[in-house]
Amino acid sequence: MKHYPYHYHDLSNGERIAYRTAGSTGPYLLLIHGNLSSSTHFQHLMKALEQECQLIAVDMRGFGRSSYHKSLHALQDLAEDLLELMDALSISAYSILGWSTGGGVALEMAASRPTAIQRLFLLSSVGVQGYLPPSKSRLVSFNILPILANTNPALAKWNPVLQRIEYALKSGQESLMRKILSPLYQNTPISDEDFRLYMEAACQQRNYSDICLLLFTFNMTNRHNGFVAGNNRIQQVTCPVHILHGTSDDVVSLESAYLTAHYLSQATLQFFDAGHSILTDQPQALLASIRQALFDNSGRQITFKL
């Protein structure tokens, strides 16, 4: 794995955001990771695209090497962090690829800055009405959902499943971490080197319970999702959206992809023979989809204007 050095930016809210960059020509593409991950997970993708794109891979607040001084109240808080970062980097027009939780953050960014965000790639993303797990998900089997239903952060943190995961993250206990991360790499085994890097990145997360709660209270539609009423911010997302989802995703339900496509008439929907980590299950097919969306047949960047 090629390693890209970290850069840091201090936000006006007192947080420090860590990020990596690659490439010096072509369209800007912001890479936003998901839960139990960080910018480390994008380094293979960055190497593959650095001759064609200018890439910025972030560690969101509470992940990786970014700070976590202030608690989060919504995924929109993470979106505001990243919008401020992109402003500080003087990047006024860019596309976003958001994986899993990062897809929800990407949607919030697009709703806040419809003229700046040129294109969204929602990679195995949380849906527009919040987290919808497959019926066989551990969150269902371990009865985590009823505990989170009251959306009380203090009570949610006492859920035994969340407690066990947070213990594993703090202790770095490899046997537990392998069980926790196994749904991410269920289809295609990854190298021991990559796994250890990904495990180390996951163990740097300090906001796991908070993120889990925010995924259930995320709702950009005009309907109630069973936990909270929607804010209908989805209407403010006007850029082209590419929904990329694995057919055997054991973390985020396929219904999430269909629901997002239903609310976004400009969205395209593409399925991969992959689990939750299309990045490692189908890297070449994913690259082809990104390139097709960003460039025309002659290699020229495809631009989008309102």
Image: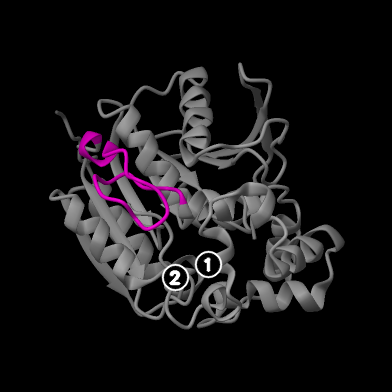
Q: Earlier in the sequence, mark 2 or mark 1?
A: 2
Residue 268 image point, x, y percent: 19, 58
Residue that badge 1 annotates = 145
Q: Residue furthest front?
A: 150
Q: At numbered mark 2, what does the secondary structure look like: helix, strand or loop?
A: loop
Q: Is residue 278 left or right of residue 78?
A: left
Residue 97 image point, x, y percent: 40, 48
Amino acid type for the residue under numbered disc 2: Pro
Could you tell me how far apart the alpha carbons at marks 2 and 1 are, in whole angstroms? 10 Å
Q: Is label 2 or label 1 in front?
A: 1
> Is residue 2 a member of the stretch shown in magenta?
no
The mark found on residue 133 in the picture is 2
* Residue at the spot 14% in from the left edge and 28% down from the top edge: 306
Viewer-nearest residue: 130 or 257: 130
Q: At numbered mark 1, what does the secondary structure look like: helix, strand or loop?
A: helix
Q: Using the image, determine if residue 243 lies above or below residue 32.
A: below
Q: Is residue 235 left or right of residue 290?
A: left
* Image quadrant in which you'd find residue 285: bottom left
The N terminus - image quarter: bottom right
Please provide the residue range marked out in magenta: 217-236
* Residue at the spot 26% in from the left edge and 41% down from the top edge: 234
Amino acid type for the residue under numbered disc 1: Leu
* Image quadrant in which you'd find residue 117: top left
Q: Using the image, determine if residue 226 lies above or below residue 161.
A: above
